[in-house]
């Protein structure tokens, strides 16, 4: 037992990894309903606040996880949720799921339809099933007026065709964890879409091509995310036991993106936070850890 509850929450992050962002950050993709967070979620949220990650959007990838994300968002003022069916699970799409998603999209703390999209890298669901579920969710986005949180892996060309056909009807959309090539990026920007960048770019083995692209994304379209517990950045100055990524590490990703863009971390944090607040229509008041 400890008398000071804040004394323990940094224990799981080595001193060298604690990094308070110079300006508040929004993590637009945090899978905090992942089982790896079940044991210490409260501490994970406290560490994020201590790092100046003041808002987290929890990714809802199927019905169960979306419902969990919504109930967490009800418990914490700085958490919001998305609700959708990930392309991996697209083969499960049916009328019942569609109804459940439609209901979730009415919840005040649900700020986007998704994660939905196309993943032709793994094809856990067939491409035909993926397209069917994705187009149904595009329809739900039109109905609700919510922005879209989109996953695309190795499916840029088809994604562009589909989005071109829907563009006039949907509001905004973000391609989260963008990893594609220059042509795909420009295709998305031409459609006036937003881009989410993760720690992928901190990976010297496979993030190289992205580093040249970072400066080409207008700040008004760029947002940042951990996609935790996945994609632990490879630029961290210390080893992390368990290798689980978490929102408190977002400032390290921002540092890397700012470096390749040639601007300060403060400028990048301020701009991406303003972009995320407008995109997800978050309330103007920023949660301040110092106030608690
Ligand atoms: Zn994804």
Image (spheres, helix red, strand yellow):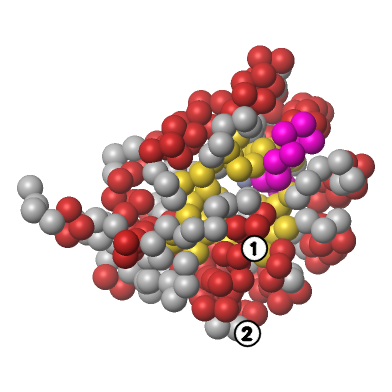
Q: Indicate whether 26 appears above or below 73.
A: below
Residue at point 64% right, 63% down?
A: 275
Q: Position of residue 127 (x, y in %)?
A: 79, 33
Range covered by the magenta-colored residues:
141-153
Residue 229 in view in this figure: no
Q: Residue 110 falls in which quadrant of the image?
A: top right
Q: What residue does disc 2 label?
A: 262
N-terminal-most mark, 1 or 2: 2
From the viewer's perspective, tell me whether residue 53 is left or right of residue 93.
Answer: left
Secondary structure under tag 2 reads loop
Q: Residue 140 falls in which quadrant of the image?
A: top right
Q: Residue furthest top?
A: 96
Residue at point 17% right, 59% down?
A: 7
Image quarter in which the C terminus is found: bottom left
Q: Position of residue 228 (x, y in %)?
A: 48, 51
- Separation (CA) of disc 1 from disc 2: 19 Å
Q: Indicate whether 93 appears above or below 20.
A: above
Q: Indicate whether 196 appears above or below 264.
A: above
Question: Do the numbered discs 1 and 2 sit on residues whose CB atoms are within 8 Å?
Answer: no
Secondary structure under tag 1 reads helix
From the viewer's perspective, tell me whether residue 245 is left or right of residue 168.
Answer: left
Q: What residue does disc 1 label?
A: 275
Q: Position of residue 82 (x, y in %)?
A: 58, 39
Q: Is residue 144 magenta?
A: yes
Q: Position of residue 125 (x, y in %)?
A: 70, 29
């Amino acid at each position: 037992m400890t008398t000071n509850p804040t004394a323990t929450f940094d224990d799981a992050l080595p001193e060298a990894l604690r990094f308070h962002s110079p300006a508040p950050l929004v993590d637009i993709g945090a899978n905090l309903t992942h089982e790896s967070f079940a044991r210490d979620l409260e501490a994970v949220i406290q560490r994020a606040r201590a790092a100046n990650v003041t808002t987290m959007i929890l990714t809802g990838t199927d019905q169960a996880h979306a419902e969990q994300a919504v109930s967490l968002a009800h418990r914490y003022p700085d958490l919001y949720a998305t609700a959708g069916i990930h392309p991996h699970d697209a083969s499960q799409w049916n009328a019942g799921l569609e109804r459940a998603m439609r209901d979730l999209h009415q919840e005040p703390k649900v700020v986007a339809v998704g994660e939905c999209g196309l993943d032709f890298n793994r094809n856990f669901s067939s491409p035909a099933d993926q397209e069917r579920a994705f187009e149904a969710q595009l329809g739900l986005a039109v109905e609700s007026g919510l922005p879209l949180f989109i996953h695309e892996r190795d499916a840029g060309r088809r994604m562009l065709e589909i989005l071109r056909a829907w563009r006039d009807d949907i509001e905004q959309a973000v391609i989260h964890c963008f990893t594609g090539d220059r042509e795909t990026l420009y295709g998305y920007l031409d459609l006036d879409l937003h881009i989410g960048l993760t720690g992928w770019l901190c990976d010297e083995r496979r993030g190289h091509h992205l580093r040249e692209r970072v400066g080409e994304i207008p700040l008004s379209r760029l947002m940042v995310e951990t996609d935790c517990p996945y994609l632990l950045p490879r630029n961290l100055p210390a080893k992390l036991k368990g290798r689980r990524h978490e929102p408190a590490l977002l400032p390290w990703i921002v540092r890397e993106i700012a470096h390749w863009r040639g601007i300060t971390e403060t400028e990048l944090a301020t701009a991406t936070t303003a972009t995320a607040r407008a995109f997800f229509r978050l309330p103007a008041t920023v949660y301040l850890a110092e106030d608690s």
